[in-house]
Amino acid sequence: MNSENDKKLPPGTIGFLDQGEDTYMKDVSFEGFDNAIVAQGERLKVDDVEAKTTPGLSMQVERDEKSFGYFNIAYGILLAIAIGVISVLYLDSEHKVLLIIGSALVLFWLCYWNGWFRNKIVGIFSKIQDLVEKYHG
């Protein structure tokens, strides 16, 4: 499989031809596959930077009181579970207090400032409200 193009490849890029912006695979070996992943990762990093700096569409969500009620309920439930789990651990009381404070802060951040988690909370409560009870009788 030796051809003109194989001789032009630099060491460490076995099995790959770089044709400008496109990278083509030839006779993929394990080492070549690793190089392809690294090359693709570098390309993705550059694309991400360009996407972040390019002005485009933006979206803003305004939550109503009902959504904030969901956040409060979720925070209370998750904190109660965390405190229950921490209280049964065989640790000194000082360590338990530190764990409870830490988990309360992390849960507070998740429930009130993390957009992804807040969307999950609203999605879960929306699915619960949309459940239809079926009676077979």
Image (cartoon, rainbow, N blue to C red):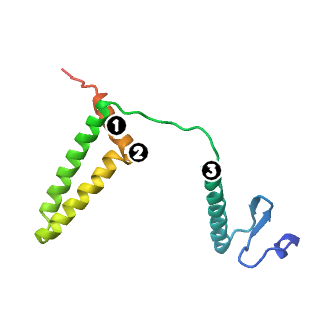
Q: Quadrant of residue 9?
A: bottom right
Of the 4 image quadrants, the one containing the C terminus is: top left
Residue 73, position in %: x, y?
22, 40
**Which structural element holds mark 3?**
helix
Residue for badge 1: 122
**Which structural element holds mark 1?**
helix
Farthest residue in the top direction?
137
**Nearest the eye: 81 or 134:** 81
Asked if marks 2 and 1 touch (Cβ < 8 Å), the reply is: no
**Nearest the eye: 115 or 10:** 115
Residue for badge 3: 53
The answer to whether residue 71 is left or right of residue 51 is: left
The residues bearing labels 2 and 3 have C-alpha atoms spaced at a distance of 21 Å
Asked if marks 2 and 3 touch (Cβ < 8 Å), the reply is: no
Sequence order check: which comes first, mark 3 or mark 1?
3
Which amino acid is tagged 1? Val
At label 1, counting other C-alpha atoms closer than 10 Å, the crowd grade (few under 14, some 14-19, many 20 or more) is: some
